[in-house]
Every structure is written in C-alpha cells, then in structure tokens.
Amino acid sequence: MSHRSRRIRWLVGACVTTVAVALLLVVGGPGARPPRAGSGGGAGTGTGSGGTAVGAYLHYGSPGVERMEELSRWLGGTELRAGHTYLPGDTWANIEGAPDSLRTWARWRNERADRLFVLNVPMQEHNEAGVPDARVAELIRSGARGANDDHFRRLAGRLVDLGVPDTVIVLGWEMNGFDYTHRCRPDPENWKAYWRRIVAAMRSVPGQRFRFDFAPNRGSDAIAWTSCYPGDDVVDIVGMDSYDQEPGRTFDEQVTQPYGLRRQVDFAKAHGKRISYPEWGLFRHGDNPEYVRGMLAWFAEHEPLYHSITDYCPHGVWQCGQNPRSTQVFREFLSGGRG
C-alpha cells in the first residue's frame, strides 16, 4: 500500500506473540456470519479448482510456507490454495528471482495441482527509495524502450526452471499510488508500454504459462487506475488491494466510491477478466468486524480467482492479536472449508 513501506513484509518477525496465540485459541465461537450472496463456490471454500482460492500473506520467505499449514489447522482444515509472496524491489538481482525461498514456494505449489502461486513482482529496482517523479518518468521511458527486458526474461526462466511456469504475476502492484518507483502517474502512456514490454519478455520464455494480475489500490489515489490499464491482451486478471481505510468510512462506501470495488468488478466484466484481491485487511478503523464481514460476503458473491489477507498487525486476524472481533468473524466464516 502507498501508506507504508513494503520492507515490513519481509522484515516482519517470525513469531506470533503469546497474547495473539492465547487469543486465537479461544476465538471461533458462535458469531454472525456474513450473508451468503450467490450460489457458487465463493470464498468460503478452499478446495476445488473451480472456486475461489483462499490465501494469506504470512511471511515473504520460507516461514510463510510453514505458516500456511498452521493457519489451515487453525481454520479447522480449510485448504489454503493461494500462496502469496513478494520479490524484494531493492536490486535487479532480487527482481530476477534471486531469493532462495522461491524454491520452497515452488515445492508448496507443486504438492497439489489446484494450488496457485501468487508472486508480486516490482517493475523497477530501488522500488521504495523515494525516487522523484522526474526520475521515475525517465525510468518508465527507458523500460518502455526495452532496457529491462533481460531482467524479466531471467525471472521468467527461473520460475519455469523451478517448476512454477503458471505463476500468477502481480506486476507493478498499486501502480496508481504515490510512492513506488514503479508507479504510473509520472508517465501513464509509457508506463503502459513498459508493462507490455515486460509481459512480452516473460511470455517469450519457452514453457511459461504465466497469468498477469493488474492490481491497483482501491480508489482514485494518485491517478485513476483505469488510465494505467495496459490492454486486454497483456492482462489476465483485474485485481485490487483493498484495506479498511479512507476513502470509505464504511464498507458500502468502499464499494461505491469512485474507482472502488464496484468499479473493479464492472471493469473486469466489461473486459472479460477474472478478479482478485492480492491484499486486503484491517487498517485505519481498527478492529472492524463489519469490514471483514463485508469483504467475505463480497468474495462469496463475486467469486474472485483468489483473495489473500495481509496477516500481520495492524491488518491481520491470525498473527495479530489486536483484532479479536474481526478474528472471530474470519475464523468462523472460513473454518472447515464451509461455504
């Protein structure tokens, strides 16, 4: 999200606090479930290749894989089919897939045929370095001319070699924001051309079957995200990162705001695309079970390809003990693979 550094994702501590563990052992009792909308597989089931794949961001590296199994047990055996992590955007070597933890994620993916491996991929190095707009515009234009093609071909080759040629690539996420070096606003037209170059480079690698997920922040942010959309031929999924924060005091306002959840669903339908939610979670409004209830009902109604809660404080419900009411709603709704 544009409101905080992504470094926290891969520096966040590995252990759950004693308070959080104690809380999680006692929650999950009777509570109001989100209303069931629609009749499909929805977000309440973690199994079956035709339904929504449930996931959570738990740690960027190998501990994230271990915690997937622990979270599944906490949910009474619900299968978590979406494994979600990030490539650090500090150096081109890391964007090319240097982290050895990719091997662990690849093994997890290949243990079951119906699993998804979801990988956020930065479009520029020094992605959180506070690079000014003028320099970002230069970097966008350079990328649009092909300067970085080799980096992305190397990443594609590494993923194919690791046995995950069908990875869902969340490329240049939250591009409509203010902060990331891969942001769109400094030069939208060349940004779209750059996205197209990256997709072409990665698709040129033999054996690949990648799907590319275009995932802006919910809302207008720095630029209308529709102004950054690079084209139906280079986008497979229309995603959205949607945290409980302004604009949108209530969940209903988050649905109806300009470029909000409703706009995403309508846009994806008009372009013949599946939807996704690579990041969602609590934030500015604290422990807010109505938000969690609203999001889970939204998933059930609209059946995204996958959704992945960001599960550390302040956003989370399992590794974070400060949201007990929201934790109860989440656990009850998803426990035991119930729909």
Image: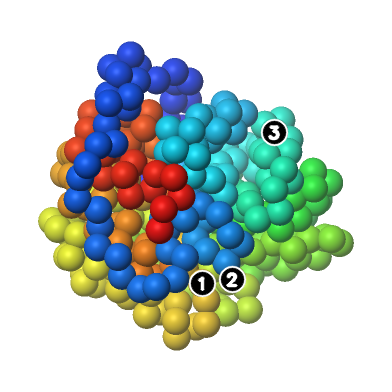
- Secondary structure of the residue carrying numbered label 2: loop
Residue 48 at x, y = what percent? 58, 59
Q: Quadrant of residue 60?
A: top right
Q: Please name the amino acid that badge 1 sits on.
A: Arg
Callouts 2 and 3 close, C-beta under 8 Å: no
Q: Please name the amino acid that badge 2 sits on.
A: Asp
Note whether 19 is above or below 75 in the view shown. Answer: above
Note whether 70 is above or below 186 in the view shown. Answer: above
Closer-to-camera residue (6/17): 17
Identify the residue position indicated by label 3 in the image.
104
Q: Give the residue drawn at x 32%, y 27%.
A: 24
Callouts 2 and 1 close, C-beta under 8 Å: yes
Note whether 313 is above or below 270 in the view shown. Answer: above
Identify the residue position indicated by label 2 in the image.
236
Q: Please name the amino acid that badge 3 sits on.
A: Thr
Of badges 2 and 3, nearer the viewer stands: 3
Task: Residue 313: give its label.
Answer: none
Closer-to-camera residue (224/234): 234
Residue 165 appears left or right of 66: right
Identify the residue position indicated by label 1 in the image.
274
Residue 135 at x, y = what percent? 49, 51
Instruction: Point out the tag, 3 or 1, that comes first from the N-terminus.
Output: 3
Instruction: Point out the tag, 2 or 3, that comes first from the N-terminus.
Output: 3
State how far apart marks 2 and 3 are (Cα).
25 Å
- Secondary structure of the residue carrying numbered label 1: strand
Instruction: Point out the tag, 2 or 1, that comes first from the N-terminus.
Output: 2
